[in-house]
Structures are given as C-alpha cells and as structure tokens.
C-alpha cells in the first residue's frame, strides 16, 4: 500500500473498550490491535501518509519518525499525561500539533500513590509473600511492624494536579503536608501545604511522594546525595519514572537509611533493576497508576477527541505547551 492509500489515522496500541468506535465512525484507521507496543521498524513502516497518529509512551516520535510520516501529518495525540517520548520542538517546526491527556488520570494515579504508600508503610508485600510461600508463622508483638501515617510529615515533590490530589487525600490521615515546585503555588491551589526549598523538603519529610514530570532537568533529581537528606527511616513513593535514581534508591534501602520504598514507573521499562527486586522493603508495581477502566477510557477518549478536533479543522483540546 502506498502512502497515499494509507488510512489517514494510525493507532499504535489497543485501546480501552469503547474508545476507538468514535474515531473509526468518522475516519478510516489502521489499528495495531495488540497490548504490546509496535516495534520501531513496524512503526516507521506504518507512518507514511498519516494525518494523525495516536501514540503511547513507548512510541518515539522524533525526526526519523516525522521524516517517515511525511508533510501531511497534522497531529500526534499521545495517550499519556507525559510526553517525553515526543520531540515537541521538532513537531512544532513542522507544524505538527502534539496533544496529551492531562487531568483525566489524576484521581486514579493519586489513589495508586496512596495504595503504594500504605502497602510500603504496613509491609503488605512482605506479609503476602510470607503467606504465599507457605513459611510457618505466628502472630507476635514484634511481627512485621510497620509505620503509622497519622500525623507523619508528608512531602510532595511536584505539586501539579496529581500532587495536589495526593495532598488532599493526606487530610484523612491528619498529615502535615509540604511540597516543592520550582515556584510556590497560589494559596488556593496548595491544598493547605507549605512550599519548601527542595533540600529542606527532603530533610523534613518522613514520607515523600514523587509526582513531578520527567524531563532532562528532573532526571535523577533524587540521586544518592539527595536521598541521604531524608530523615533516617523515611519512605519514598515514586510515581514518575527517571526522577529517582533507582540504583541509589536500592542502596538506601539496603543500608537501612530508608524504611521502605514503592515504585510504579521505571526508567527502563519493562526492565526493573535487580537491586530493587532484591529489596524486601520495596513495593514494586508494573506502571498501574492510571490502570482503571474508567481512567483508561477517559485517556483514550481524550486522545481521540483531540484527533477529531484537529482533523475537523479546529483547535486541539489539550495541546502540549512548550
């Protein structure tokens, strides 16, 4: 099939139930009907002639991809709130609009952060592994003691939508909340939390939840030196791949400097460092932050809405702001 004969839309991954029909009702589309990402060669081979591509975080949109797609490409609709897989500047130089799916995954991701936090502080992973292994056990006053959250200082690194939702949920636990952003938020957006400089935030956070976006500036923002600033016995929950140095995190657990940690996104997914897998006090989840039926339908629906708006001659609903 020549580029001119290709359906105008490419969807690179199987979407949640009920999402794709609104798109295919208006436009012919090539659907990669698989839960796994397209390999690079297949993605480049499928790109020519498309006016719109609905991508996921595993699809690298760079100069090579844009060359393969051709000048008729109008929109890259990324099925994620993040967009580090897309060279936004290269797209803008060619007049290609880039969209993402902010907002619709906030509640689910904040809920997951709290699920991981509770699992880490109450040692649920260790307890379940013990039972499933068939290891003999008995209740005792010192058996699998965890940490209580009530009144414990919580730090939020990245007070965007998800960070604010994490902070709101902390009220139920009577936890004082502080946060770090590059700039303090207006008081009405801060959810009662206090802004602190980064290193002060780390030094005063018994529990730290990382929700800031990944970028060249935030990669390994929490390296070994900064992790060492946390109070002894602190707990770290990472919801963003690449911000926490995973090897440094494993070392801090191994030394006992941290009580526990939980990670939902990994820098080199699907690979997980062996050093983290070896840590009993690490709760590890396979990128489940937005993994609810309602949220994934909303994410897919928003990506489709952006494509329909742009191909229909209108403005993108949720463009990436450079």
Image (cartoon, grey):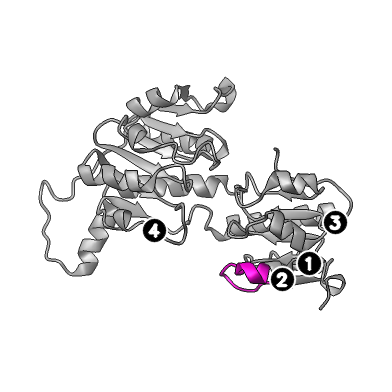
Closer mark to the observer between disc 1 and disc 4: 1
Q: Residues within 10 Å of mark 2 (few under 14, many from 20)?
A: few
Q: Quadrant of residue 305?
A: bottom right
Residue range corresponding to the magenta coloring: 31-43
**Disc 1 on helix, strand or loop?**
loop
Q: Residue at x 80, y 49 (%)?
A: 94
CA distance separating discs 4 and 2: 30 Å
In front of the other: 56 or 115: 56
Q: Residues within 10 Å of mark 1 (few under 14, many from 20)?
A: many
Q: Is residue 183 magenta?
A: no
**Disc 3 on helix, strand or loop?**
helix
Q: Residue at x 44, y 59 (%)?
A: 286
Q: Read off the residue under disc 2.
A: 45
Q: Quadrant of residue 138?
A: bottom left
Which of the numbered marks, if any, corresponds to residue 144?
none
Q: Earlier in the sequence, mark 4 or mark 2?
A: 2
Q: Residues within 10 Å of mark 3 (few under 14, many from 20)?
A: some
Q: Residue at x 44, y 53 (%)?
A: 266
| CB-based contact (under 8 Å), mark 1 and mark 4 | no
Closer mark to the observer between disc 3 and disc 1: 1
Q: Quadrant of the C terminus?
A: top right
CA distance separating discs 4 and 3: 39 Å
| CB-based contact (under 8 Å), mark 2 and mark 1 | yes
CA distance separating discs 2 and 1: 7 Å
Q: Read off the residue under disc 4.
A: 272
Describe residue 297's horizontal placement relative to residue 271 as left or right. right
Q: Read off the residue under disc 1.
A: 48
Q: Read off the residue under disc 3.
A: 311
């Amino acid at each position: 099939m020549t580029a001119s004969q290709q359906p105008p839309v490419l969807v690179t991954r199987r979407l949640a139930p009920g999402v794709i029909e609104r798109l295919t009702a208006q436009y012919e589309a090539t659907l990669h009907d698989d839960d796994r990402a397209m390999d690079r060669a297949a993605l480049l081979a499928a790109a020519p002639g498309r006016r719109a591509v609905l991508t996921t975080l595993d699809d690298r949109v760079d100069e090579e991809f844009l060359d393969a797609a051709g000048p008729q490409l109008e929109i890259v609709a990324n099925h994620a709130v993040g967009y580090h897989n897309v060279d936004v500047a290269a797209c803008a130089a060619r007049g290609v609009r880039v969209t993402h799916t902010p907002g619709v995954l906030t509640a689910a991701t904040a809920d997951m952060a709290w699920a991981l936090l509770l699992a880490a502080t109450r040692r649920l992973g260790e307890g379940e592994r013990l039972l499933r292994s068939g290891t003999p056990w008995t209740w005792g006053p010192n058996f699998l003691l965890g940490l209580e959250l009530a009144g414990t200082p919580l730090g939020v690194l990245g007070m965007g939508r998800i960070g604010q939702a994490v902070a709101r949920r902390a009220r139920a636990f009577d936890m004082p909340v502080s946060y770090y952003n590059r700039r303090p938020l207006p008081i009405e957006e801060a959810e009662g939390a206090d802004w602190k400089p980064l290193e002060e935030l780390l030094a005063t956070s018994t529990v730290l939840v990382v929700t800031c976006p990944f970028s060249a500036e935030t990669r390994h923002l929490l390296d070994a030196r900064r992790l060492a600033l946390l109070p002894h016995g602190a707990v770290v929950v990472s919801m963003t791949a690449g911000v926490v140095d995973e090897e440094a995190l494993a070392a801090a657990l191994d030394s006992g400097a941290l009580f526990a940690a939980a990670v939902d996104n990994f820098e080199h997914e699907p690979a997980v460092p062996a050093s983290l897998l070896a840590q009993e006090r690490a709760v590890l989840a396979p990128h489940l932050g937005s993994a609810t039926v309602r949220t994934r339908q909303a994410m897919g629906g928003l990506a489709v809405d952006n494509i329909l708006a742009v191909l229909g001659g209108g403005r993108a609903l949720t463009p990436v702001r450079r």
